């Protein structure tokens, strides 16, 4: 009897060892694919690099048996659209999965290590684009490969939209929502660039966010012109001073506080779990969203959450060190609260700038003005169930993002968009999206894949 038990125990140990080796091999394969994707420098203007990435991605889709892959050349970049037809069609419209291939430029001399050299350090994967948005892109790709391998039978088409200019013009998403609409038309989209979670260092989950709204992006040019003259004879009508005064007025201005379905849902969820000062401020703001004092205090903790915000981002002026300036210009970037018109903000900026400065909207800079996507119980519950495969009872909170995404172009053209992501980071830890030494938590990167898989089983199975 003892010998038989020993044999069984030995067999179990051997099986566990084999399973462990298989898991390690799978994790290494996931890491290797991610490294390849990150190390392709898909920066604006590098058309050849986008072609390398779309070739790699198309090959990976075809490896999984997803052969309906279309690559669109446009505007100096590329957009990839892939379709996995339903195995058991239910008559429901497709689901669209979104990510972007392009990344913000990185000046190598500013980085500790080369920005496009993938590396691992302290539990993180590092490299430009690792966090924004190549982790989400790779997670979608791997989740679809694994679902195909396990013979998942989808009841609706699953479409993938990987764009190449989300960080710049947004033309890929704009074109997809209009002239390529037949290729991507869906009941709704899940946008990996606008969802995900956060976990405390001790393993407790803070929550996962589902983006249902985003601010409108718009740039404005402030221009002061003057007849100039010799610097030895200064006059009070100086273009640089006029512009400086206008920028000071913009800096000091506070737009009116606002609330909508997205921010209200976020505040209600957060206020229930916070008994401190932040929770008290949230409850006060919910009771009176026009309270500027409370809104200002919230803004100090969560910038951009309660209103439109504008900030100067670029500056130029003068033409010679010994001449009065004939022209001075500044760019002011605004993230506009949904419901507020781009022209309305321009008019407010013009009033602040005064008569000696002209304020114009920068043509082509704007994202569409969109209302929040209506909440759906089925999608929220599917998100909760998917996250629960890793974090039991983790809260899922709707939110409005201050940053712009490709989702705005789809919302503006009638496709509902929900920010969804299984990726998570550590509360209080810097991840450096758009900044130096960009990184993503390795456990979050690998852990997102089964969350994506479970989400797709629930909404497309």
Image (tube, helix red, strand yellow):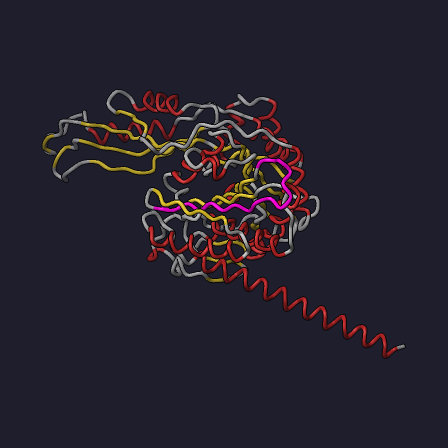
Image quadrant for the C terminus?
top right
Quarter residue 327 falls in: top left
268 left or right of 105 in image = right
User: Residue 446: within the magenta?
Assistant: no
136, 355: nearer the viewer: 136
Does the stretch in magenta take in 88?
A: yes
- Residue at left 15%, top 37%? 319
The answer to which of 131 and 349 lies nearer the viewer is: 131
| Spot occupied by residue 368 in the image (x, y as percentages of width and height) | 42, 30
Quadrant of res 230: top left
Using residue 292 as the reference point, say whether residue 102 is left or right of it: left
In terms of image quadrants, where is residue 91? top right
Please tell me which residue is depicted at 33% across the width and 50% down the height of the picture. Answer: 47
Q: Magenta stretch: give its range.
A: 77-93
Front residue (pair 272, 379): 379
How many numbered marks does the figure carry? 0
Residue 329 point in image, percent of width and height: 25, 33
Q: Percent x, y for residue 375?
A: 61, 31
User: With respect to residue 16, does 391 lie above or below?
Assistant: above
Q: Nearer the viewer, residue 404 or 308?
A: 404
């Amino acid at each position: 009897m003892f010998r038989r038990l020993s044999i069984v125990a030995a067999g179990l140990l051997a099986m566990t060892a084999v399973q462990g080796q298989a898991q390690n091999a799978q994790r290494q394969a996931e890491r290797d694919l991610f490294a390849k994707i990150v190390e392709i420098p898909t920066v604006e203007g590098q058309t050849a690099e986008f072609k390398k990435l779309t070739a790699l991605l198309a090959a990976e889709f075809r490896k999984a048996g997803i052969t309906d892959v279309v690559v669109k050349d446009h505007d100096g970049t590329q957009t990839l659209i892939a379709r996995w037809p339903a195995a058991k069609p239910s008559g429901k419209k497709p689901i669209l999965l979104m990510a972007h291939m392009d990344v913000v430029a990185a000046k190598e001399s500013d980085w500790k290590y080369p920005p496009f050299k993938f590396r691992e350090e302290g539990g993180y994967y590092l490299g430009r684009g690792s966090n924004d948005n190549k982790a989400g892109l790779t997670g979608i790709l791997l989740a679809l490969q694994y679902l195909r391998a396990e013979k998942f039978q989808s009841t609706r088409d699953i479409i993938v939209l990987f764009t190449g200019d989300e960080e710049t013009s947004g033309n890929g998403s704009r074109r997809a929502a209009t002239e390529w609409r037949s290729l991507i038309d869906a009941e709704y989209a899940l946008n990996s660039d606008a969802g995900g979670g956060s976990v405390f260092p001790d393993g407790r989950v803070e929550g996962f966010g589902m983006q249902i709204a985003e601010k409108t992006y718009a740039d404005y040019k402030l221009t002061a012109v003057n007849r100039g003259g010799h610097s030895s004879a200064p006059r009070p009508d100086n273009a640089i001073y006029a512009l400086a005064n206008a920028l000071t007025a913009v800096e000091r201005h506070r737009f009116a506080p606002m609330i909508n379905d997205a921010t209200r849902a976020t505040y209600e969820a957060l206020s229930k779990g916070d008994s401190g000062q932040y929770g008290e401020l949230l409850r006060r703001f919910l009771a009176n969203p026009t309270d500027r004092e409370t809104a200002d205090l919230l803004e100090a903790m969560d910038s951009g959450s309660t209103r439109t915000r504008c900030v100067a981002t670029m500056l130029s002026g003068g033409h010679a060190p010994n001449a009065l300036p004939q022209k001075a210009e500044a760019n002011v970037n605004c993230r506009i609260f949904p419901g507020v018109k781009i022209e309305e903000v321009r008019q407010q900026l013009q009033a602040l700038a005064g008569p000696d400065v002209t304020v114009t909207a920068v043509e082509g800079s704007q994202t569409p003005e969109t209302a929040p996507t209506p909440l759906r119980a089925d999608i929220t519950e599917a998100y909760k169930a998917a996250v629960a495969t890793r974090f039991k009872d983790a809260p899922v909170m709707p939110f409005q993002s201050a940053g712009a995404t490709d989702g705005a172009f789809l919302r503006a053209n009638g496709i509902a968009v929900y920010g969804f992501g299984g990726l998570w980071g550590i509360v209080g830890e810097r991840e450096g999206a758009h900044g130096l030494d960009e990184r993503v938590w390795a456990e979050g990167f690998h852990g997102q894949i089964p969350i994506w898989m479970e989400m797709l089983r629930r909404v497309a199975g």
